[in-house]
Each structure stands twice: as C-alpha cells, then as structure tokens.
Image (cartoon, rainbow, N blue to C red):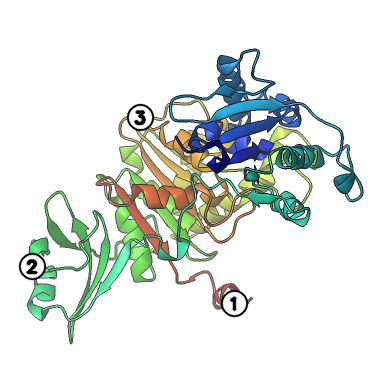
Amino acid sequence: MPPASAMKIFVLDTNVILHDSNSIHHFGENDIVIPITVLEELDNFKKGNESLNFHAREFARTVDSLSSDMLFGDGVSIGPRLGRICIRMEGQFDEKLAANFTEKKPDHQILNTAYQVAMEHPERLTILVTKDVNLRVKAKAVGLMSQDYKNDHVSDVQRLYTGTRIIDHIDGELITEMYKPPYEFPADQLNADPALTPNEYLILRSEHKSALAAYDEELNLIRHVDKIPAFGITPRNSEQTFALDAILNDRVRLITLTGRAGTGKTLLALAGALKRKKSYRQILMARPIVALSNKDIGYLPGDIQSKLDPYMKPLFDNLGVIEHAEGSTKRSQVAKLLDDKILVIEPLSYIRGRSLVKTCFIIDEAQNLTPHEIKTIITRAGEGTKIIFTGDIFQIDHPYLDSHSNGLSYLIEKMCGQRIYAHINLTKGERSELADLAGSIL
C-alpha cells in the first residue's frame, strides 16, 4: 500500500454518480469524499424509471451498506485494495470563493467542500471529479485540480474501429473468384495485415478489378457482398451496401452504424428491418429524448403523446421515405404494420424493463446515451433479437457526454472483434448535394 501522502483525495460531483453509481470502486486505493450537497441532489432523482433514477437509488444502497458511525468522520473502507469514503458536511463558505460565487448554488457548495478538503490536506492532491465543464473551469480558477470522470472513456476516437478496410494490389484471380459460385475464397489466401476482424467489410482492388467483400470468421472465408435493395431502398455507395448486408445477416445480432447527418444510417436500419420483418415478432424504433434548447418536454403543449411527437418526428420522416420508395404498395404495407403494432415507434424510456424476444430494435441518436444505458438496452435482448444502434459520435446533445465518453463510442471500442457484432462508419452523405456541402464545410 502506498504512503498516505501519495494517495489522492477525489471529491465527487453529483453528475459522476448519476453517470455511474459504481464509480466509487474505480479510484483504486485513493480516498473519496462525497459532499452532503451531492446526497441532497441525489435525493431528487430517487423516483422514476430513467437511468439517472437507477443510479441514484443504487448509490444510496451502496452507501447504506457501508454505513457506520465513521461515515461522516474519517470515513470507512470501500473494500479490499480500495480507499476510504466519507460524507462531508457543508462547512462555512470560504472567503475566497464567497467573493466570486453564489453560496446557495449546489455546484458552488460542492466546489467549496472540495476547496476546504484541499486546504485541510496540503500534503495530498485533492481532485474534484465532475462531468460539468463549467464547474471544472471554476475549480481551476481557484487553484483546485479538477478532472472529468474517465473510467469509461474511449482513449482515441480518431482511431476507433471503422468496420471497413481497403486492400490494394490483390491478385486479380481472387477477385474473379468473387464473381463466380460460390462467390467466396479462403481467408488465408488474402494475407491481410493487420489480421481481419470478424464481420469486417473489405474493398478489394487489383490493377483492373475490384470487389466488395466481408470476412466470415466462423467459416474463415472472404465472401462477396452484393448491392441488394431493401423495401424499395437501394444502397448508393459501398458503405451503405456494407451496412445493409450486416443488417440482413441473421448471424449478426448487434450492429452499430455511425456517420454524420445524411449518410443514411436510420433509413438503412429501418429498410433492412422491414425486409426481414418475417424473422421478427416486432420492429421497434426508439430514440433518447434530448431537447436542443433549454426547454424540456414539460414546456411543450398538449398531452404526453403531443409532447413526444416532435422527438419522434425524425423516425417518421425516414418511414415516409420508405413509404414513397415504391408507390402505393409499400405505403399500404407500412401502414398495416403500424396499425398491427408490428412496427412500433416509441421513446426509449418506454422500453426500459422489457424483455425483447424476436425483435429488431433500432435505437436512433445513440450517441446521446451513456455507457450504462447502452448496456441496459443490450441486456434486454432475448432469443432471436437484433439490436441496431445509429448515431454520430461527433454531434452530441447530452450536456455531460462527449465523443470520448458517450455510450456509442464505448460500445464500438468494447465490442470490436466479437463474432456476432458488426460496425460500419458511413462517411458519404447521400441526402442531397446541399446537405452534404453543409455537413462538410459549415
């Protein structure tokens, strides 16, 4: 065990616990301080079925299991090879902070607690851990070290798995084999470096020929990937072709599609699910409700359905594209699927607690989910269920998430290499020339 002076003191903000109720177990042998203000704020989140409510309740149970007379004094041990945790009562507001910050604001009370701990233990490094960027800036302004909670951060989003690879200088005979039955060849003949990832998609190019392919790890084969339309939607580029192939592959049970607006992520997911509708009892589409302004759902007029409609509108827009793809026949099929509740569009919060069997579950805007929320959704999957996450990891509306900490990035990094998982990063905009131009230069 390191000397006491080498161990750090971490003061946790409320949003860290609401992000991960198990966070206190991820600071090694360092000590943890929970300001009493944090417990008061957590008390406001106890009731409800959202992820925040789960974390608030779970943390309360954890603290209760550690309770002793020492919890509000020197603290108690969190567990073997872990530090101690204590609840810190609110003290007198420091004069230095009082001159610049309002005392009644919870963030400032937490900042004051962290500052007092730092003053009382000059021999140790005190760090305020918060996912609030503004609070981190305020802490640094008063000379207090502050960090984001990084236990579930992706180390480098620029090097995140893309799901596709271009391989040049391929023997022309191998590519010729891709266009003849059985439209495949042994993967050993490719000599790919680095080694191929299960369900990785390939653009194979020789001097005069090219082919789209995928690596089948189970059979150790490179198979040809053809451009196949789905419910009136035809892929417009190689990435869309790969995405639709993964969606239609019954052996792939988990798919992530990333890319900026207009690349066709949601449209392809829905079209592929509708093409395979006989394989599922239900097709569910959902998205997290994250307002783009400072007004939340409660400010909108009307009943609950009226409040939810604006958030679900983008999903219906994609459905409208499919409805008009091949005329009245497709429109009547889609309308019947909606009427029969085979195709259902709901807010993500309505899905919590359910067990999904033989369901194709499409989650749009998944970059606004935390890693824990992503895990909660996937663990809902029963036998025969396929889950498709779509989103843009660089366009995040959640106040405490970024491209490194959102659940979609975390999922891609952790699932890469799994036999039943496929990922495609779509880069080519296909919505319109105007939309693609705006996405590139604005």
- Tell me the kind of residue under disc 1: Leu
Q: Name the foreground residue: 305 vs 410.
A: 410
Residue 44 visible in the shown view: yes
Residue at the spot 45% in from the left edge and 69% down from the top edge: 427
In the rendered structure, find residue 189 and report the number of the disc placed on it.
2
The answer to whether residue 187 is left or right of residue 299 is left
Secondary element type, mark 1? helix
Disc on the earlier residue, 2 or 3: 2
Task: Write down the residue under mark 3.
Answer: 382
Q: Which quadrant of the view contains residue 216?
A: bottom left
Q: Is residue 286 above or below residue 176?
A: above
Task: Write down the residue under mark 1.
Answer: 434
Quadrant of the rendering where the C terminus is positioned = bottom right
**Depth-wise, is mark 1 or mark 2 nearer the camera?**
2
Disc on the earlier residue, 1 or 2: 2
In the rendered structure, find residue 410 and report the number of the disc placed on it.
none
Looking at the image, do the residues carrying marks 2 and 3 touch, with CB atoms under 8 Å apart? no
